[in-house]
C-alpha cells in the first residue's frame, strides 16, 4: 500500500460521496436543452428557428422537436457548419478554434465537426465523472499513483486556410491537455505529435521501460498492436512484465468482445475492462461499475439526447430514417430496444444523427450499449442483421472452432449467376481456418439467432462465402488505403464495390 495512492484514492472516494444527483434524468435533460437553446439564441441558427420564443414554451422539448428538423452531416455541414469555418455565431457563439476530422468508417472523405471551448469543457467534465466512479471498482492504491497511456491519433494538428486547426478528436483533446497532465499522461505530447503510426508506436516501445503505466485507453485493435510491439522490443512474456501496475483498459470505438482472448494472451494478470463512448461529436457514456460493459449515459454534460426506434416507427426496411420518425426523450425509452441516437450539443450540433444505434440495458441508472452503426445494418435482401448480431455470430463460431477472429467485413454482393450472396472476409492471426466449415457454422448461427436471416437464406440470399486472411495482410490493406492509425475504425459492413476492392487486394 502506498501513501500517495492511498491519499488520492480516499480523496476521490470523498468527492464521489459529495457528488449526489438531485433531479430526475428527465429534468436533467430538460435543463440541458434549455441551457443549449439559451446559449445559442443569438446565433444564426438560433434566430432562424426562433430559440428566443422557444425558451418561453411550457413544453420546450416537444416544441423543439417540432420546430427544428433532424439533421444528417451533409445538410448540417452545407447549410451551417461550412459557414462556421469562416464566420462567427452560426450554430454556436463565436468561431470554433478546432474542427475534428471524423475517423469514422462511413463516407469517402473526412467530416469536419466543429469543436468549441464549451465542447472541450464538456468532454473534460465527463472524464471527471469517470474518475469519480473509480471507487466503485475498489482498485488498488498503486493504480492511483501510476500513469495513463492514451493511444490517440496524432496531436500534430494542421492549420486550415480559414484559420482553425484540424485533426482527429483524440489528437485535439491531447493537444489541449493542461500542463499538469504531463504528470501522469503518456506517451506525452512530443511522441503523440508523431504523424506516422509505426514511428509513434516504435517510440512508445522504446520509452516503455521508463513508465509506470496503470491504465491504457484506445481502440482495441490498435492498442493490441502497440502492446505486442512493446513486448517484442523489450523481449517480454507479457505486458505486465514491464508494467506490473497495469490494471485498467478503457476500450472504445468498436465492440470489445472479439478482442478479449487476445488481450488475455498478452497479459500476466486480469485487466478490468471499461467501455467508453467517445466520438468526434461527444463523450456520451462510460462504464462506471465493475463486471459489466454497460455504460452510464452522461446526462448533465452539455448534451441533449433523442432516441428514434430502429424499427418501422423510425426507419424503413433498409435502415434509413423515415421523413417524420417517432422520437423519444430519456423518460420515454425502454430496455432492449434499438434506437438511433440523435444529439444536440454545445458544439452547435442540433438534432444531429450521429449514425450509431444503441439500446438501454437499464433505466435506473440509464445505461446503454452500442449495438452498431445505422450504415452497418445489412438488409439488402431482407436479412436484417445488425452489427450486434454479426459480432455475436462471429464470436460463437470462433469459440466453437477454437480460433480468434478480431476483425471482419461482410457485404451483400452478386455472384456469377447475378444472385445475392453474403461475402465475408475474416481476419485471423497465424491460424489456419477451414473456410467451408466456418461458412457452414456461421450461416447456421445467424439462422438460429435471426428468423429474418433464415427467411432470406431460403429466398433471395443464395449463399454465404468466407475468405480468411492473416492480420499482416489486413493491416497492409488498411495502410494502402490510408486507414492505419490509433483511432481508425474499419467498416464491418461494406458496400459491394468496397468488398470487391478488398477481394482484389487479397487476390493480388
Image (spheres, rainbow, N blue to C red):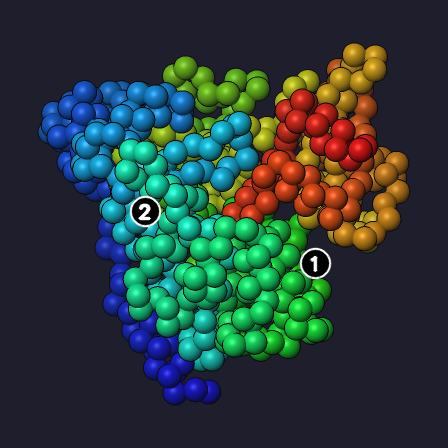
Q: Position of residue 133 (x, y in %)?
A: 39, 63
Residue at the front extreme, as displayed: 161
Q: Looking at the picture, tell me which residue is in the foreground, 125 or 12.
A: 125
Q: Quadrant of residue 488?
A: top right
Q: In this rendering, which labeled residue sits more in front, label 1 or label 2? A: 1
Label 2 sits on residue: 299
Q: Please tell me which residue is depicted at 24% across the width and 50% down the height of the picture.
A: 23
Q: CA distance from mark 1 to mark 2?
A: 33 Å
Q: Looking at the picture, tell me which residue is in the foreground, 92 or 160.
A: 160
Which secondary structure lies at badge 2?
Answer: loop
Q: Looking at the picture, tell me which residue is in the foreground, 155 or 468.
A: 155
Sequence-wise, the earlier of marks 1 and 2 is 1
Q: Is residue 209 above or below residue 73?
A: below
Residue 261: which numbered mark, if any? Answer: 1
Which secondary structure lies at badge 1?
Answer: helix
Q: Please tell me which residue is depicted at 36% across the width and 54% down the height of the picture.
A: 175
Q: Position of residue 451 (x, y in %)?
A: 70, 27
Q: Quadrant of the C terminus?
A: top right
Q: Is residue 249 above or below residue 247?
A: above
In this picture, residue 477 sits left or right of residue 20: right
Q: Is residue 25 above or below residue 343?
A: below
Q: Position of residue 40 (x, y in %)?
A: 18, 34
- Residue 394 in view (yes/no): no
Q: Is residue 308 above or below residue 193?
A: above
Q: Position of residue 412 (x, y in %)?
A: 70, 23
Q: Please tell me which residue is depicted at 78% across the width and 42% down the height of the picture.
A: 469
Amino acid at each position: 500500500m502506498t501513501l500517495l495512492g492511498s491519499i488520492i484514492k480516499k480523496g476521490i472516494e470523498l468527492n464521489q460521496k459529495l457528488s449526489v444527483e438531485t433531479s430526475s434524468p428527465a429534468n436533467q435533460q430538460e435543463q440541458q436543452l434549455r441551457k443549449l437553446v439559451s446559449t445559442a439564441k443569438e446565433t444564426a441558427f438560433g434566430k432562424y428557428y426562433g430559440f428566443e420564443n422557444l425558451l418561453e414554451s411550457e413544453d420546450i422539448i416537444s416544441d423543439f422537436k417540432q420546430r427544428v428538423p433532424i439533421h444528417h452531416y451533409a445538410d448540417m455541414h452545407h447549410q451551417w457548419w461550412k459557414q462556421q469555418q469562416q464566420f462567427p455565431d452560426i450554430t454556436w457563439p463565436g468561431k470554433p478554434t478546432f474542427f475534428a476530422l471524423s475517423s469514422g468508417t462511413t463516407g469517402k472523405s473526412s467530416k469536419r465537426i466543429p469543436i468549441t471551448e464549451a465542447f472541450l469543457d464538456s468532454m473534460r467534465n465527463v472524464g471527471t465523472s469517470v474518475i469519480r466512479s473509480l471507487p466503485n471498482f475498489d482498485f488498488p492504491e498503486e493504480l492511483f499513483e501510476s500513469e495513463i497511456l492514451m493511444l490517440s491519433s496524432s496531436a500534430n494538428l494542421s492549420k486550415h486556410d480559414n484559420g482553425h486547426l484540424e485533426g482527429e478528436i483524440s489528437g485535439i483533446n491531447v493537444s489541449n491537455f493542461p500542463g499538469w497532465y504531463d504528470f501522469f499522461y503518456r506517451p506525452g505530447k512530443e511522441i503523440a505529435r508523431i504523424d506516422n503510426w509505426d514511428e509513434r508506436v516504435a517510440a512508445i516501445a522504446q520509452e516503455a521501460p521508463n513508465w509506470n503505466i496503470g491504465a491504457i485507453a484506445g481502440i482495441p485493435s490498435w492498442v493490441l498492436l502497440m502492446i505486442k510491439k512493446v513486448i517484442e522490443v523489450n523481449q517480454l512474456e507479457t505486458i505486465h512484465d514491464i508494467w506490473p501496475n497495469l490494471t485498467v483498459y478503457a476500450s472504445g470505438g468498436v465492440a470489445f468482445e472479439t478482442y478479449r482472448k487476445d488481450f488475455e494472451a498478452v497479459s500476466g494478470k486480469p485487466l478490468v475492462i471499461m467501455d467508453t463512448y467517445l466520438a468526434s461529436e461527444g463523450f456520451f457514456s462510460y462504464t462506471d461499475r465493475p463486471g459489466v460493459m454497460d455504460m452510464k449515459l452522461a446526462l448533465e454534460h452539455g448534451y441533449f439526447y433523442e432516441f428514434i426506434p430502429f424499427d418501422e416507427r423510425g426507419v424503413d426496411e433498409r435502415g434509413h430514417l423515415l421523413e417524420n420518425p417517432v422520437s423519444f426523450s430519456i423518460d420515454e425509452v425502454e430496455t432492449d430496444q434499438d434506437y438511433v441516437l440523435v444529439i444536440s450539443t454545445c458544439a452547435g450540433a442540433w438534432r444531429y444523427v450521429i449514425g450509431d444505434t444503441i439500446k438501454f440495458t437499464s433505466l435506473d441508472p440509464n445505461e446503454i450499449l452500442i449495438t452498431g452503426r445505422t450504415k452497418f445494418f445489412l438488409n439488402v435482401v431482407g436479412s436484417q442483421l445488425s452489427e450486434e448480431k454479426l459480432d455475436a455470430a462471429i464470436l460463437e463460431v470462433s469459440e466453437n472452432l477454437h480460433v480468434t477472429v478480431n476483425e471482419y467485413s461482410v457485404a451483400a454482393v452478386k455472384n456469377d449467376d447475378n444472385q445475392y450472396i453474403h461475402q465475408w472476409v475474416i481476419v485471423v492471426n497465424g491460424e489456419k481456418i477451414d473456410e467451408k466449415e466456418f461458412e457452414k457454422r456461421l450461416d447456421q448461427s445467424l439462422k438460429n439467432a435471426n428468423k429474418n436471416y433464415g427467411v432470406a437464406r431460403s429466398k433471395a440470399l443464395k449463399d454465404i462465402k468466407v475468405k480468411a486472411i492473416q492480420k499482416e495482410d489486413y493491416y497492409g490493406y488498411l495502410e494502402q488505403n490510408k486507414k492505419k492509425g490509433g483511432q481508425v475504425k474499419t467498416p464491418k459492413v461494406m458496400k459491394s464495390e468496397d468488398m470487391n476492392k478488398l477481394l482484389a487486394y487479397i487476390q493480388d
